[in-house]
Image (cartoon, helix red, strand yellow):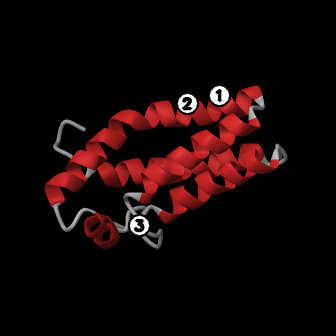
Amino acid sequence: MAVGNQAAAIDLPLALSRVGGDVALLRDIAQIFFDEHPKMLADVRQALADRDSPGLEQAAHFLKGAVANFGAARASEAAFVLERMGRERRWDGWEGAMADLEVAMEQLLGELASLLPPSH
């Protein structure tokens, strides 16, 4: 699933191992994530806009857990950076951290779309 020299956003063997090799279950989880990710990202953005440290920590932690289901290391790390910023009540560099998360999410969503039926 890698494009050019870019690392894959999904670790498919890891993701499959987390669902006992059940491809249908992985597709179901991918569909749920596909449907729910806009709210997850909106919660992170809102916490940033409000300078809500506990809210940022919680929203980023939730997103980090969701992307971990797919072995999405880049998205997980990007969410963790924001989670840590919320925990530490730090706002310096949040724009770059959010941009990193959005790029990682875009790549992840592109790869997830390939797991889903053609309607996506």
Q: Nearer the viewer, residue 62 or 110?
A: 62
Under mark 2, the amino acid is Ala
Q: Residue 4 versus residue 44: which sits nearer the camera?
A: 44
What residue would you read off at disc 1?
46
Q: Earlier in the sequence, mark 3 or mark 2?
A: 3
State the image coordinates of residue 107 (x, y, percent, origin top left). 44, 53
The residue indicated by pointer 3 is 8
The residue carrying pointer 2 sits among few (fewer than 14), some (14 to 19) or many (20 or more) residues within 10 Å by Cα, namely few
Mark 1: amino acid: Gln
Q: Residue 78's mark?
A: none
Sequence-wise first label, 3 or 1: 3
Crowding near the residue tagged with mark 3, few <14, some 14–19, many ≥20 C-alpha atoms within 10 Å? some
Q: Which residue carries the number 2 mark? A: 42
Quadrant of the snapshot with the N terminus:
bottom left
Q: Residue at x 42, y 70 (%)?
A: 4
Please give the name of the residue rendered at 58% of the width and 31% of the height, measured from the top-left corner.
43
Label 1 residue SS: helix
In the structure shown, which secondary structural element does the residue marked by tag 3 occupy? loop
Q: CA distance from mark 3 to mark 1?
A: 29 Å
Q: Is residue 115 visible?
A: no
64 to 11, vertically: above or below: above
